[in-house]
Image: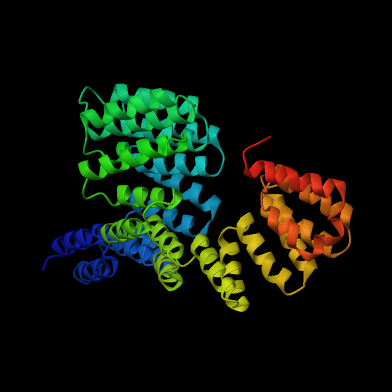
Amino acid sequence: MEHEELLQQGETLAEEGLVEEALSRFEQALEASPENPEVIESVGRALLGLGRLEEAEASFQDALEIDPGWAAPWMGLAMLAMRRDEPFRIVHYLERAIETDPDHPEAYVELGRYYGLMGEPALARATFGRWLRGHPEDADMLINAGLTAFDAADYAGAMGFFEQALEAAGDEAGGPQKSGARTFRANTLDMLGRYPEAVAAYEEVIEDSPEWWEAHANLGICHARNDHPKEAEAAFRRGLRECPGSPEIRDELAAHLLAESGDLQEALRLSEEAVALGRDEVRHLYTLGEVRLALGDEAGAEEAYRTVLLLDPEDPNAHLELGLLHEQRGAAAEAEEHFIEALKSDPGNPRTLYSYASIYYAADDLETAEELLARALAADAGYSPALSALASIRARNGDYPASLSYMEKAVEAGERDVEHFKSALEFAPLRDNPKFRTLLSRMKAGNTGKD
């Protein structure tokens, strides 16, 4: 079999998510054509997809030795650097890809989006601008520029890019570029607080392209965000009728039912279907885990989160959820293992730090617990669980003024667990304290929606 045929088979398998099988085909192609840079680069991509980073890097370097003027191996090295979280190398490799092939749009997209992710909106805009100066009608690049601005909460800037993209996309109302740009524009209207306009914009997309699942899903999210849960559910259900093969709408409807205390058995069925249709989508597995947990199926929830780790062994949220499950079972050592793994990838996550601190709190190591809680507050000064926990620690140490100070900050941040503060033994000496009683009243008022 010629190497071209093996290469094509491998690409098809890779597109279907069968990376091991794809690698096998690419390696067979490599045996047939060992000096072919296209085959070597394909092997590198498959190795990267399997997390075999050192081997992938060697393949990309080998491809560059044979063809130093080809952008694809530089892109591969950039993707590898992203996996390793090496900012300088990411930018360097993407710039080399652009230098090698200035007409390679993917390099500009990746570099612009990366700058946006790193909180450098000016550099992101400049990167997209470099491409758009020569290709002002590139709707895809305008959409990517808009999405980067949107992610940076620059909604006015995002609106400008999406409207330019709509003009560049031409007159075909139901085309993917136009439908995408119109949907993203509607998202932006929602974030700008223009709810009625956003709803009308989503409905226009749906009227022209009822099969465009993104519009249905985002319309439902828009309704839910604006406190219209019935309209949200109706939008998701209509979307499921119009797009019966969509795992995304199943996932959104399942998450909505869970949030609104709806039919959990239906939510379970929908989330299981979403996973079956789009197993490689981590968020579907998260929804499945959450629904199973709500139904009391801890083993099933654990299975879902462990499946996430099979797809991404470093996923911090899966490690956090598994840590919480172990903590609830009293398996402190296993919980700590997962919390540490979560913090490796996301060291400033206040929920993880708070959860990790709770292990030390339960073991009466208040000093270590307080250190972790201080880190949580450094990341989010208004994280109420950490503030409440610090109030407890200070009360246990007999430092009641500091305890009341943290308690007040917790209430201001939204703490409403009146029963905890009323019943916890460390607060017993404060039960007749006027400030303590006032703070309890404020929590009660918050629970009933009164000022």
Residue extending farthest left: 1
Q: Residue 10, how many percent across, how many down?
A: 21, 63
| Pick the front one: 273 or 381 | 273
| Pick the front one: 320 or 406 | 406
| Pick the front one: 9 or 184 | 184
Quadrant of the image occupied by residue 73? bottom left
Q: Quadrant of the N terminus?
A: bottom left
Task: Tell me which colouring the rendered structure shows.
Answer: rainbow
Residue 133 in sight in this render: no
Q: Residue 92, how many percent across, how many down?
A: 50, 48
Residue 437 in sight in this render: yes
Q: Residue 256, how many percent across, how many down?
A: 40, 48
296 sits left or right of 398 in the view: left
Residue appearing at x 42%, y 63% in the figure: 289
Q: Quadrant of the C terminus?
A: top right
Q: Residue 312, how many percent across, how many down?
A: 43, 64
305 over 131 or under it: above or below:
below
426 sits left or right of 115 in the view: right
| Pick the front one: 301 or 61 | 301
Residue appearing at x 31%, y 51% in the figure: 250
Quadrant of the image occupied by residue 288? bottom left
120 over 88 or under it: above or below:
above
Please state the total of marks drawn on the protein image.
0
